[in-house]
Image (cartoon, rainbow, N blue to C red):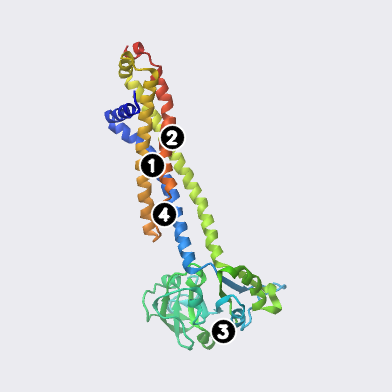
Amino acid sequence: MTFTDLLRLGFFGMRTRPLRAVLSALGIAIGIAAVVAVIGIPASSAQSLRDKMSRLGTNLLMAEPGQTFGGQNSFLPDESVPMARRIGPVTGASATGAVSAKVRRSDLVPTSDTLGLSVQAAHPDLLEVLRGKVRLGRFVDTTASKSVVLGSTAASRLGIERLGVQVWIDGQWFTVVGILDPMPLSPEIERSVLVSWETARASFGFDGHPSTVYVRTTDSAVEDVRNVLGASLNPAHVNEVRVSRPSEALEASRIAESSYSSLFLGLGAVALLVGGVGVANTMVISVLERRREIGLRRALGATRRQVRGQFLAESVLLSGLGGLVGVLAGVAVTAGYSVSQKWPAVIPLPALLGGVGAAMLVGMVAGVYPAVRAARLSPTEALA
């Protein structure tokens, strides 16, 4: 009996009991779909992160004041930004300053309800250094006007989607003249209400000390600039300057997400195991129901090896069909979720090939016992 004959017999066994075959293959399909989706969705997320990193750059450094040896809050000198620009590989520097003020949607909102937002003074070149974009309106300028620019999160929490709306900041009305796009490397800007440096001085008594200095440098000199940035910004108190790299926070979040991916991958493997048990159960029942067929084939000259091959082929084909359906379902889930998150859909080729291969392997293992049991039946016993 040739290999083609085995495949034909396997398909014949599946066609004679289509409903049972579909239900058995469904378990395998669910497991494979879960595995493909769990591999594809993190891969799409990782590609989206890589795209963001290449667009925003990994060469951004952020310096903030730390604490003195006595535990008191330190501060950065007023000249921090010009001093940062003197470093050779630095291509741009700007800063924000924390303003002691509370923003509310109106004067009727309780003072304690600040929605987790802060007021920050900003230089006009801040967006250029951060590679951010204004979604609506414009950014802050150098005038002491009663105008503000909202980060994307701040606009969402305040419920503001258009320009010209006013917000209440420490007893004063300010007009919204700009709303920013999301800025993944600077979430603190997303949660801020930005005013010009001059407005902060005139309206809130801002002392002019920057609370965060942003430095953009060449890619090859990031670590070198990081090592000297503290000494450049505050030479008298180098240990009171904290220097960080915002892109590392995004990379850390990806590592945290990978632990959840491993968990769901394990759940997919469990579903695949359950599907394998279902295939094995189907094949055992099939052997019991087809005893006369087995006896007749043995009486006509079929060997034990041929009978064993017939049922093993049917089990592998059944699981392979479920694996193929599962791969297609996993691809559809990955693509749909990626589109909803505005990610590029990435499905690794090994996941596609491995999904079908794993399903067939499960079918082979699940079909061993039923195939051996069928082969052991003697013609007289089977026809009795």
User: The residue tagged with tag 3: helix, strand or loop?
Assistant: loop
Residue at 52 percent of width and 71 percent of height: 188
CB-based contact (under 8 Å), mark 2 and mark 3 = no
Name the residue that disc number 1 marks.
30
Mark whose residue sits in front, 3 or 4: 4
What amino acid type is highlighted by mark number 1? Ile
Instruction: Evaluate whether residue 114 shows in this view.
Output: no
Classify 10 Å Cα crowding around label 3: few (below 14), some (14-19), many (20 and above).
many
What amino acid type is highlighted by mark number 3? Phe
| Mark carried by residue 206 | 3
Compute the Cα span from label 1 to label 4: 20 Å
Instruction: Evaluate whether residue 290 shows in this view.
Output: yes
User: The residue tagged with tag 1: helix, strand or loop?
Assistant: helix
Q: Is residue 210 left or right of residue 148?
A: right
What amino acid type is highlighted by mark number 2? Leu
Sequence-wise, the earlier of marks 1 and 2 is 1
- Placement of 360 over or under 285, stated as above or below: below
How many numbered dots are placed on residues in this image? 4
Sequence-wise, the earlier of marks 3 and 4 is 3
- Placement of 303 over or under 268, stated as above or below: above
- Placement of 134 over or under 39, stated as above or below: below
Name the residue that disc number 4 marks.
346
Mark whose residue sits in front, 1 or 2: 2
